[in-house]
Amino acid sequence: MYRLHGKADWGSQVIRMALEELGAAYDFREQDIEAGDLASPAYRAMNPFGRLPVLETPEGALFETGAILQYLSEKHHALAPAPGDADRGRFLVWFTFVVNQLHPTIMTLVHPERPGGVEVSAQISAVARTELLRQMAALEDETTRGAWWLSAPRPSILSLYVLMLLRWAACFAAHPKDGVEARAYPSLFALAERLEARPAIQRVMAAEGLSGAAFSAPQA
């Protein structure tokens, strides 16, 4: 059994989605950030940076969302093209894009005060939004190509990751006017609508206190 250390409606959410889609047994351990759980010696032994999520596995504790997702897909031979598949390379390109570009840009939108302080957060947020629009347009174009790993009938670690980030982009922006809604991107919007209706995703939503169109059209 896996043990997932996380927080409801946080970055651990996509790991939880993947575990549910895989039908893997796991125990979810809610972390109290304000109480200092992430600074405890026990937690820092699993993740020296004191961040979420952490997944305890038979091979040891793992951190970094992208690494955990790739580990799960390879361990269970699911949720990603297998090594040697013709579309493995393209999948890895877009998965890496989400990890290295889309996620950090959205995090800047959520926390624009981090790069330069509160005084310039509005300007940083606006720059992040401009970059996010460019990235979302590229992702929308890729989604229209019909690859299974960016479609709802057969979810992947990539589509699940995108699903979580669509929620963040729409309702977690520090400056709400800079939020970006999935509805502006028809293929991504349709993807989110179909994924959030899946039983596995519904179970995660119920466990984390979410309902309705929590990913396709979330309310702040």
Image (cartoon, rainbow, N blue to C red):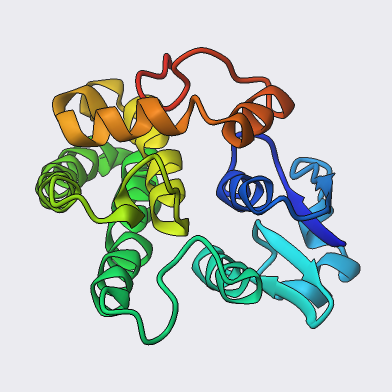
Q: Quadrant of residue 178?
A: top left
Residue at point 69% right, 73% down? 62
Q: Nearer the viewer, residue 98 or 155?
A: 155
From what the image shows, is residue 172 above or below residue 22?
Answer: above
Q: Quadrant of residue 149?
A: bottom left
Q: Position of residue 196 (x, y in %)?
A: 48, 28
Residue at point 30% right, 22% down? 176
Q: Nearer the viewer, residue 7 or 126?
A: 7
**Residue 145 shown left or right of residue 165 in the figure:** left
Q: Is residue 179 visible?
A: no
Position of the N terminus, as image quadrant, is bottom right
**Residue 197 shown left or right of residue 149 in the figure:** right
Position of the C terminus, as image quadrant, is top left
Q: Position of residue 70 (x, y in %)?
A: 53, 72
Q: Position of residue 106 (x, y in %)?
A: 33, 46
Residue at point 37% right, 87% down? 84
